[in-house]
Amino acid sequence: MKNPPPDVMSPYYVHLSDNTGQIYVSKALRDENYADWVEEMTNSHFAKNKISFFDDTISILEEGSSELLLWNSCNTMVKGWLTVALMEKEICNNVKHAKTARI
């Protein structure tokens, strides 16, 4: 039996080239450029169809949900993208220990 093709429009879809070390912003996050930095992060993650992990459109799933593994995988990927997003060390540490990627 053949597996169905992946749904590339699903927020749970992870492309083979995606990895937690990818950098999607060109400016380091500082107090004075927060709005610009968030705009750049939002645009890049909207393009990757992962914006729902930032804006909490997709909430954390219940234990036992059939999609929990997919949710955890994508949430971890997005958190990884945030931690390499040219943040100050203190901010980065807070993101690493957050339960979700919501900003």
Image (tube, rainbow, N blue to C red):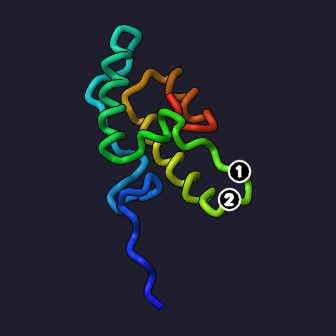
Task: Kindly identify the amino acid type of the residue bearing the numbered disc 2.
Answer: Ser
Mark on residue 62? 1
Q: Nearer the viewer, residue 74 or 22?
A: 74
Indicate whether 32 appears above or below 98: above
Q: Secondary structure at mark 2?
A: loop
Indicate whether 41 appears above or below 15: above
Whether pointer 2 and pointer 1 mark residues with C-beta atoms closer than 8 Å, the reply is yes
User: Going 38% across and 16% down the picture, which residue do you hit?
Assistant: 34
Q: Is residue 14 left or right of residue 26?
A: right
Q: Secondary structure at mark 1?
A: loop
In the image, residue 100 lies at what x, y percent? 58, 38
Q: Is residue 27 left or right of residue 92?
A: left
Say which residue label 2 marks. 65
In the image, residue 60 lies at what x, y percent? 63, 44
Q: CA distance from mark 2 to mark 1?
A: 6 Å
User: Going 58% across and 27% down the picture, which residue do you hit?
Assistant: 94
Mark on residue 10? none
In the image, residue 76 lies at what x, y percent? 53, 47
> Of all residues shown, which one is farthest toward the top?
32
Task: Kindly identify the amino acid type of the residue bearing the numbered disc 1.
Answer: Glu
User: Going 47% across and 41% down the picture, which residue do you hit?
Assistant: 52
Q: Residues within 10 Å of mark 2 (few under 14, many from 20)?
A: few
